[in-house]
Image (cartoon, helix red, strand yellow):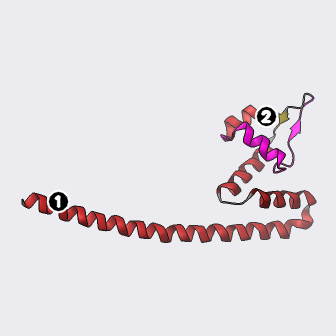
Amino acid sequence: MLSIKEVTEITGISASTLRYYESEQLLPHVKRDENGKRLYDQEDLSWIDFITALRATGMPIAQIQEYVSLYKEGNQTISERKMMMLNHKKDIEKKIKELYYNMDKINYKLALYDILEAQINNITIKI
């Protein structure tokens, strides 16, 4: 079992964020010792890693709460949870496609600047 301090060191996530995740019921299994201090195990670390991935890919807290709620209901919600992940995956793929499209525009502009710089350098050298 790990303390909140140890988990912050392992994950790089602040203690306040971990407390927030717990208060928002995103961490379904965090235990407490006799003094009320949080105790994290490997399953909690896996949940933290999963939540971090979902947040980093833009999933709102409310949607993660819904996922966790379905998880707590058990195996009868596997299809719903899978559908949530498939929909989120589609959203991520759409965002990636948009990023590549925009990166192409930026790369085009950079290529133009390379040409302009080369022309300026040739003019400067000839003078």
Tag 2 or tag 1, which sits nearer the N-term? 2
Indicate left or right for 126 with 82 as reference: left
Query: Does dot 2 land on a helix, a strand or a loop?
Result: loop
The answer to whether residue 30 is above or below residue 37 is: below
Question: Measuring 78% from the left and 44% from the top, which residue is drawn there?
Answer: 20
The answer to whether residue 25 is above or below residue 85 is: above
Query: Residue at label 2?
Result: 2
- In the rendering, which numbered label is found on residue 121? 1
Q: Residues within 10 Å of mark 2 (few under 14, many from 20)?
A: some
- In the rendering, which numbered label is found on residue 105? none
44 or 110: nearer the viewer: 110
Whether residue 78 appears in magenta in the rendering, the answer is no
User: How far across and down, in percent of the image, does residue 87 sit?
Assistant: 72, 71
Question: Measuring 62% from the left and 69% from the top, which residue is drawn there?
Answer: 93
Q: Residues within 10 Å of mark 1 (few under 14, many from 20)?
A: few
Q: Which residues are magenta?
A: 12-34
Kind of residue indicated by mark 1: Asn
Label 1, label 2: how far apart the Cα atoms are: 61 Å
Quarter of the image for residue 114 reads bottom left
**Does residue 52 appear in this view?**
yes
Frontmost of labels 1 and 2 is 1
Quadrant assignment for the N terminus: top right
Indicate left or right for 112 with 40 as reference: left
Indicate left or right for 58 with 69 as reference: left
Quadrant assignment for the C terminus: bottom left
> Quick one: which residue is furthest to the top in this view?
35
Query: Does dot 1 land on a helix, a strand or a loop?
Result: helix
> Quick one: which residue is furthest to the left in this view?
127
**Does residue 43 appear in this view?**
no
